[in-house]
Image (cartoon, rainbow, N blue to C red):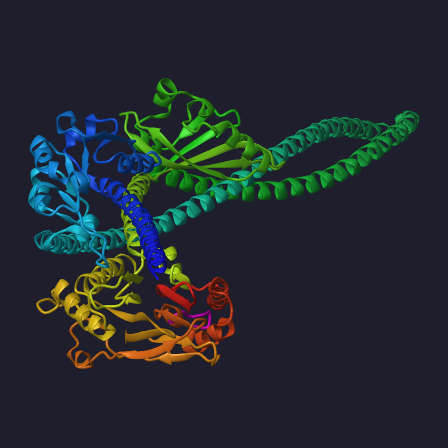
Amino acid sequence: MKMKYIKLKSIVLSSILILMLLSKGVFAQKEEVQMKMRAQWILSIMAGTTWDKSKEVQSPYYSVGVFSSKKEYNILKSLSAKKNVKGKAIKVFRYTDVEDLKPLHVIYVTKSEINFLPLIYSKFKGKSVLIISDRAKENAKYSVINFLPLTKSDKKFEIKTPIMKRQKVDFIVHIKKIGGDRDMLQEIYSSTSRKLVEEQNALRAQKKEMKEQQRLLDMQNERIKKQASDIVAKEGLITIKEQEILDQNQKLRGMQAEVIRKRMELEQNLSLLQAQGDSIEAQTQRMLKQQAEMDKASEILEQKQAEIKEIDERLGQSEMRGKFLQNIVYVFIVGGVLVFILLIGIVRSFIRNRKANRQLNRQYEAISSQKTEIENQSKELESANSELEKLSLVASETDNAVTLVDTEGNLEWVNAGFTRMYGYTLQLFRNEVGSNMLESSKNKDIKQVFEQIFKDKQTVSYQVKNKTRKGDDVWVQTTLTPILNDENEVVKFIAIDTDITEEKEFELELVKQKEHIEVQNEQIASSINYAKNIQQAILPLSKDMERFFESFVLFRPRDVVSGDFYWFVHRPAFDDNEEKLFMASVDCTGHGVPGAFMSMIGSRLLSEIVLEQKLDSPKDILEELDIKVKRALRQESTDNNDGMDVSLCMVAKEKKGYRLTYSGAKLDLYYCPHKENEIKILSSERRSIGGTTKKRTKIKFTDKEIHLQAGDTFWMITDGIIDQNNADRRRFGTPRLLESLDSVKDMPMSEQREIVAGVLDDYQGEEEQRDDITLLGFRFCNKW
């Protein structure tokens, strides 16, 4: 019996010894895990710590002193070798004696060495050294940060505010929120409130400035429109004047060609008339010669008749003269024959002369007709010359500068308008500037212009800046017109310069105003893009939502920045409050920059209500949000009526699924339990957040609670997708949205996004986006 007792006792003692060894091993393992956790915390705290500036700049690395056992030193050294703080390396030193301590950034005193904490504090007092202690009790007042025992509490360490200020170190807000005391948290809240007020004031000032810029821009646009209208009117007048000048030039060219043709015909007629006159004069000389011959024959006949008469008288006196008479008769007969022959010659000559006279009469009649025609042509020529004189008078009196140029470019004539415009006469211009247009023109392409006119035989216009004799700049529009002969060859050029200086100066002023507006637009666009970056920063990251759900986001701002925003917060459990998720889709008044300002206010206020005031109920959150928005925008004392529509959910875990509590301000929630395979709607209240409409303020927000399982899906929207119109001005509408969601409800979330976006794009077509568009999709799974 005694042996059994001894054996049992030895077994019990052995068991106790084994349990002690096991518990010691477990304790050692647990202690090592806690050491690693504290080492990680030290490195994380260092990343959010600010030291004195001189200490930050002077040191090429961050130094950490460990007043502890070798094991804790090795753990911290191993972890710090793989990391850096603010781009600098971390060096870890181990100390066992206070006298050996050197200037450091951080000194960590472990629990086993906590009694040395007062000496260490006195050595580094006020020298910008972060003193961290491990589970100090009475001596905790000598450390800036004291690690607390690892319990179920969320508070892992405590910050001693007086020591922190005395040691000239500071922490980011996140670290202060984790370990700060009541005074520090109150200071953070006050600072946050002040910053929020400052941001709100800055936003109001910026909004006011942008309104003023918009007003100035609108005024400038009105001036530009008026100036553009004036330009169009002036261009119309210039076009009319140019057309009148072209018509005059065309008429002048036609009349010049007609004058040249008439002149040539006149010269031909004069040559013909001269030839006919010479012929008539020759015929007249011949007729005069024949008349002289006839006069001479008549004289001879008269002499013969006188001789015959004298013979008759002699015969009458003497009969003795018979024989002689007979001889006389013979002589008379012979003379008669001779006279007869002479008469025949005279008659023949007369007949020829009469024929010549008839021919001369016909030629005279032809010459008279030609003379009449020549007189008519002369009258027409005088009329043409009169028209030319009138056109010359127009050319001399017009304000336009008119220049006549030959085919070589030499200046032949300028009008008075040329002298008035440039201050040069033709001779002065030749002497001081040049006599050739190809050399004196300010148009560097003038030779190509001449070549084009020679080739196309068409008028060419161009604009050029010339100088007057006084040295003033004058912008002109030059119209260069060719003058053609009957062979369609260019023989002259007429250059007409129209003063367009005022129009050009106005055009340059418009260009300057355009450039100024473009610079302003670039500045505004830069500011808006910066606002976009700020707005993107307040939106939740997809990876934060993917930790708990399968999800997608379809977010399409109408402009660069959006009046829509979506919001997601994970609030860990605290005290008796369970872990919860909050998400919202929000449509603020307006879009673009004004809407973006509202979205920043809304996001900040939601986070403040849920994370700092720790409200849970969606209806209470919306009521509080309504109060804060009115207060932030001072809507009780101003005419500001801006607000927002909100769809808000709170999700909590249950033993057999999830509890979703919803409340909405004019934005409904859509959900689909996968077992029922049907999309259902949780309706919102017909009331917005903010604004001063008293009638709708009487409507109270209510909570609607549903229970969902893994695989169930819900969607949150803003009204942009519903209100989007197509080419026929018809809205996308809620029925089409439900139809689209129903067709994709069983698909993966990423595919849902692509398909719904494609349906919306096809419906919208080429139409502009009407409003900001937001669609959020969530599916419960086993991630949470």
Confirm whether the magenta stretch covers residue 558: no
Confirm whether the magenta stretch covers residue 725: yes
Q: Nearer the viewer, residue 294 or 675?
A: 675
Is residue 500 visible in the rendered image? The answer is yes
Quarter holding residue 53: top left
Residue 57 x/y as whole percent: 20, 28
Q: Nearer the viewer, residue 614 or 503?
A: 614
Residue 70 x/y as whole percent: 27, 34
Q: Nearer the viewer, residue 111 or 232?
A: 111
Q: Which residues are magenta?
A: 723-729
Quarter holding residue 134: top left
Q: Name the dominant secondary structure of the magenta segment.
A: loop
Judged left or right of residue 647, residue 248 is: right
Residue 172 x/y as whole percent: 19, 46
Relative to 164, is 573 above or below? below
Q: Quadrant of the C terminus?
A: bottom left
Judged left or right of residue 439, residue 273 is: right
| Residue occupying the point 31% across, 66% down | 583
Quarter holding residue 45: top left
Relative to 733, is 163 above or below? above
